[in-house]
Amino acid sequence: MNTIWAVLIACITACLLAVTSAVGAGGPKPEPRPKAKTIAELAERYDSSRCLECHEDAHDQWSESLHAMSILGTPRTAPTIITAIEKGLKLFPYSGVKKDEDITVESLMMCMKCHLPQLDEATDDVAREIVATIRAWQKAYKVGNYDRAEELEETIASLNIGCMVCHNKLALIHKYADGYPQPDTVYGATEGDHEDEEYPKMAVAPALGEAIFCGQCHGQGPNFELDHPSQCATAYGSYLFAYIAHGGSKTCQECHMDESGLGHDMQAYRDEDMIAMAVDVNVDGQSLFWRKNKQEGVLPIGIINVEIYNKTGHGIPDG
Ligand code: HEC
Ligand code: HEC
Ligand code: HEC
Ligand code: HEC
Ligand code: HEC
């Protein structure tokens, strides 16, 4: 009997230890880095090209994704940010923004919370530089100066959701338990030394492979923590409350990174394979003659039954 208890207790202890050691190697909250003062400085801090050398596949895939151009978009996002300023910020009586010079990091966070979360590491000058750059890009297009437009487009795209946004800044979600991301560490599925000079350590991010990781930006509804809640993406809310609640069990990563075969090139309806994975459509048709009434007599009619079944993990389209 005693041996059974001893074995049981040993097992329980081992389980507890396993749980503890699976906790990511975050640490105490680091001192905030000095604020980036220009777009160039912020882009340099989150530059993904330095990872290309050793992670060519991840880099090539990522560079095709919208994450690699997250404030330019398709390029629909940059102009919409301007619309949000003109039709929103500047018209709201208490936003403190009457002209471009009044724009701050805080006022842009209603978009940048998800489109460029690292903007919180920059000065208000950078927020204004972003707006000025988007305006100059739009103007260059308008007057047909395409070389200049392309150059400015590159500047806009240099700010993006790069490797270190996911593998460092947003990698650890439950910071009281797992700690805060450390400035010398890349977070993934393994721990140990990392060959990169600037990030010589590698540690585990427990939720990187879970839907909640993507949920940080893919939205549940209004962003209530902001003074003026905005709403854009809601796929994560739909995932939790419609897909998971109805028995769905896959993660975002399983569908978008693994089954799609796309890895870091996370795509949706712009990709043929994703379109094929999206819906089952069944169409049934039958024709018959129908005796309507005395006046109109017998009429030929067709009945078409269309069934569309959404196989994704959320409502489509989103946003
Ligand atoms: C909660 C996070 C979040 C916030 C806040 C947010 N967005 Fe988005 N936005 C996304 C995500 C994620 C997508 C892409 C996926 C989708 O459409 O579901 C997206 C898509 C878009 C698109 C379409 C993208 C394209 O390339 O065509 C535009 C335009 C856009 N957002 C503009 C804005 C603007 C402007 C703001 C601020 C007023 C804003 N968003 C605020 C997360 C957000
Ligand atoms: C939008 C978030 C996001 C961005 C941006 C991102 N990654 Fe990842 N990465 C992930 C996730 C999530 C996983 C884990 C996938 C899983 O568990 O299924 C991952 C896995 C990895 C892995 C482990 C092996 C593998 O390929 O699965 C490496 C290495 C990696 N990423 C490198 C990079 C590099 C280099 C970049 C920049 C070029 C990058 N990642 C950009 C989210 C991201
Ligand atoms: C000099 C080569 C080199 C450079 C540069 C480099 N890495 Fe790595 N990285 C490695 C090697 C080698 C591994 C371990 C092999 C593995 O497990 O995939 C690794 C592992 C990782 C992992 C963990 C993968 C896992 O399976 O958990 C992530 C995440 C990662 N690197 C991200 C990055 C990012 C982001 C950059 C750019 C800031 C970068 N690496 C730059 C060589 C490099
Ligand atoms: C830092 C915030 C952030 C994180 C984390 C993030 N995304 Fe995104 N994602 C975005 C934004 C913003 C866009 C849209 C960019 C644009 O076009 O303006 C986007 C675009 C996408 C798209 C393309 C949508 C389209 O309309 O084509 C897919 C698919 C996607 N993300 C899936 C994922 C998955 C899966 C994860 C988790 C592994 C993830 N994202 C993590 C912010 C994020
Ligand atoms: C069961 C598989 C599956 C799961 C789970 C899943 N997706 Fe998707 N998702 C898809 C497919 C397939 C599409 C392409 C839909 C289309 O062609 O319109 C898609 C489309 C999208 C889009 C584009 C939406 C739009 O505007 O049309 C975004 C963004 C996205 N997914 C993000 C996510 C995120 C974030 C998660 C996790 C919270 C997730 N997906 C979970 C399969 C999945």
Image (tube, rainbow, N blue to C red):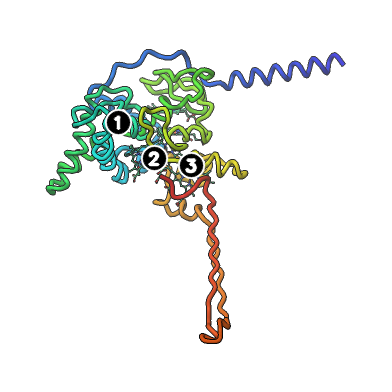
Q: Which mark is residue 232?
A: 2
Q: Is residue 148 above or below residue 287?
A: above
Q: What secondary structure is found at the residue carrying circle 1? A: helix
x and y, in percent, of residue 142 in the image: 15, 48
- Residue for point 16% across, 39% down: 136
Disc 3 on helix, strand or loop?
helix
Give the residue type that dot 1 points to.
Leu
Q: In this view, does 145 lie above or below 186?
A: below
Spot occupied by residue 236 in the image (x, y as percentages of width and height): 49, 39
Residue 14 located left or right of residue 290: right
Helix, strand or loop at mark 2: loop
Name the residue that disc number 1 marks.
108
Res 231 quadrant in image: top left
- Of residues 185 and 316, which is closer to you in this image? 316
- Which is nearer the N-term, disc 3 or disc 1? 1
User: Considering only order in the chain, which callout, 3 or 2, is on the residue closer to the N terminus?
Assistant: 2
Report the front residue among 32 and 55.
32
Disc number for residue 214: none
Distance from mark 2 CB to nearest ligand 1 atom below 8 Å = yes
- In the rendered image, residue 162, in percent from the top left (x then y), is placed at 36, 32
Q: Is residue 87 left or right of residue 117?
A: left
| Res. 284 visible in picture | yes
* In front: label 2 or label 3: 2
Residue 148 in the figure: left or right of residue 272: left
Q: Residues within 10 Å of mark 3 (few under 14, many from 20)?
A: some
Q: Does any atom of ligand 1 lie closer than 8 Å to the CB of label 1?
A: no
| Residue 257 image label | 3
Q: In this view, does 232 lie above or below 24?
A: below
Q: Distance between the residues labelled 3 and 1?
A: 30 Å
Quadrant showing the C terminus: top left
- In which quadrant is the N terminus drawn? top right
